[in-house]
Amino acid sequence: MRKFTRFVAIATLLLLASWPMPITAGQVGDELPLHIQKFGDRVLFAWVGDYMQTIRVVALSTARGIVVIETNLSRSADVRIRQAIEKEFGRKDFKHLINTHFHHDHTCGNQVYADATIVGHQTVPEGMRGELTGEGLGKLLEMFKSHVQDWGERQRKAAPDSREYHFFREGVLLVKTTIAELQEGFTPTYPSILFDKALILDMGDMTVELYAVGGTHTPSDIMVFVPEEGLVAIGDMWPDQVLPYLRKEAPWDLGAILENWGRIVDGGREIKHVNMAHSDMGLSVETYKQQYRYLKTLWDGLREMHKRGATLEDAKKKYAIERDFPYFKDRLLKVRDVNIHENNVEAIWAKLGGSASSSEGRSS
Ligand SMILES: [Zn+2]
């Protein structure tokens, strides 16, 4: 049985090596296909792969140089993306790379833009060091090696040409490449322009506004807004399909998040597109605004109730998705048996200081 499994594995590898793949710009052999999407003359999106989630990089061609938002897990993917950006924009003057948060799948490729100044929240270097050096890096490599095994197995079990098959095929290619890249020639490359709450980059004909909204995904989460293009870029906060989820144990400060988020959605400036970092996820402009309204309504309303000495039971009765936020009624409202909305009310209430009406939570 073992021998047979090994035979199947080898046969599969041979098959993979000769697997006919659609030819896309900049693709060689087993590389994941490269995709470019233009958003006007000065903005483009670039990512690799059709099935496995990778990072959709944003590039801005400004009067003061190229600004890139996000890098990938695979350095070679970023090399190809960088070349595509140079070709599309007809220039090579990379001025800034912006990290939306510290996670390895968004920062491993930083060294591809070592000639630019890298910008991120002040907690990005610490987070990157935890994942990309010493013990953290060892753990990451172990995880990727187990993915190669596990995903390879699942690919072999999947129906030929099924979506699942292609998902795992791309995944195995991606993590194998990443393992090799992390073991040789990898230099964690940290941002050198760091900020706490907000940072505005004046790029001449474009303004790149960076706002800290940390605490729900990582402490380093930011939102990027380019008002001249009506473009927002976020990292890994909440995608279209799900109601925003405030994990109880996470260190978010909702008042501070909403204050910065409000500068983007409440400032009267048009938003035309939101880039959600992962290539397999989307976030519509409408959902992005509704997420803000939902959290703002809860935050303002629950603070008011808390001040008046209401109980958590009162608070839970006050807001219902169907009645008060029907926009979200068909979205994912439960995760692993947790009712997200109920959880959010409890989480906010706990941050406000629980049932005691005397202690008001930090509001900014
Ligand atoms: Zn992340």
Image (spheres, helix red, strand yellow):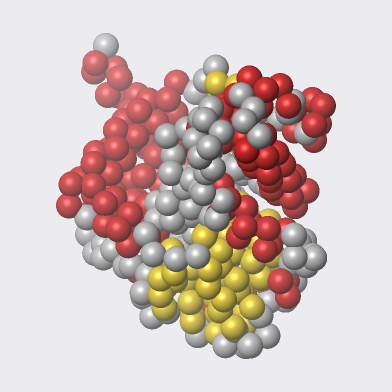
Looking at the image, is 67 positioned above or below residue 250?
below
The residue at the far top in this view is 1
On the question of residue 78 being in view, the answer is no
Q: Residue at x 56, y 63 (%)?
A: 211
Most foreground residue, 64 or 112: 64
* Quarter residue 260 falls in: bottom right
Most foreground residue, 85 or 275: 275
On the question of residue 309 being in view, the answer is yes
Q: Residue at x 37, y 70 (%)?
A: 191
Residue 102, percent across and down? 40, 56
Q: Residue at x 42, y 34 (%)?
A: 249
Q: Residue at x 49, y 80 (%)?
A: 94
Q: Is residue 182 left or right of residue 70?
A: left
Residue 245, percent across and down? 57, 35
Residue 46, percent across and down? 58, 61
The residue at the far left in this view is 134
Residue 247, percent across and down? 49, 34
